[in-house]
Image (cartoon, helix red, strand yellow):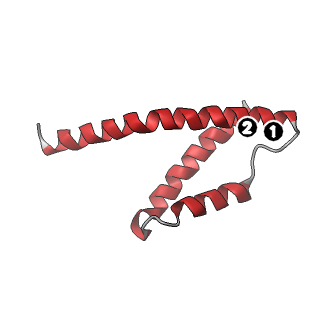
Amino acid sequence: MTELEQWRNEIRALDAQIKPLFLQRLALAQAIGRYKSKHGLPVYDPEREAQNRQTLSADVNRTERKAYEEFLQAVMTICRKAQES
């Protein structure tokens, strides 16, 4: 096995670990969306999302922080869309 194949296998293993967590988050977002709809609450709260990104990325080193914040933003956007459906 080449070094590249080894790294790709490691990424696949990490993706497999991320998948159930992502699906749990998505299910929670859908439940939150139903709650918000029932109670007339807005789906999008930009201040909360910004605070969440800032809190979660605070301990990430400077070099990787922007990429991690982009990852968080992508996940939040997907989950926000799930709340709207």
Q: In this view, does 58 lie to the left or right of 7?
A: right
Instruction: Confirm whether residue 18 shows in the render.
Output: yes
Q: Quadrant of the N terminus?
A: top left
Quarter-of-image position of residue 52: bottom right
| Figure quadrant of residue 4 | top left
Q: Which amino acid does label 2 sit on?
A: Ile
**One can see residue 82 in this view:** no
> Toward which corner of the image does residue 49 lie, by quadrant?
bottom right
The x, y position of residue 18, in whole percent, is 44, 39
Q: Which amino acid does label 1 sit on?
A: Lys
Image location of residue 55, percent across then percent down: 59, 62
Crowding near pointer 1: few (<14 within 10 Å), some, many (20+)? some
Please provide percent x and percent y for residue 8. 25, 40
Q: How far apart are marks 2 and 1 (CA)?
A: 6 Å
Residue ID for mark 2: 32
Q: Which residue lies furthest to the bottom in this view?
A: 62
Crowd rating for badge 2 (residues with CA inside 10 Å; few <14, some 14–19, many 20+): some
Residue at x 25% of width, y 37% of height: 9
What residue is shown at x 82% (from left), y 44% (from top)? Answer: 42
- For mark 1, give the secondary structure: helix
Secondary element under disc 2, as helix, strand or loop, is: helix
- Relative to residue 28, is residue 66 drawn left or right? left
Q: In which quarter of the image is the C terminus?
A: top right
Residue bearing mark 1: 36
Q: In this view, does 66 lie to the left or right of 30?
A: left
Q: Which residue is drawn at 50% across and 50% down?
A: 71
Q: Where is residue 5 in the image (x, y as percent from the top left)?
A: 19, 38
Dots 2, 1 in contact, CB < 8 A: yes
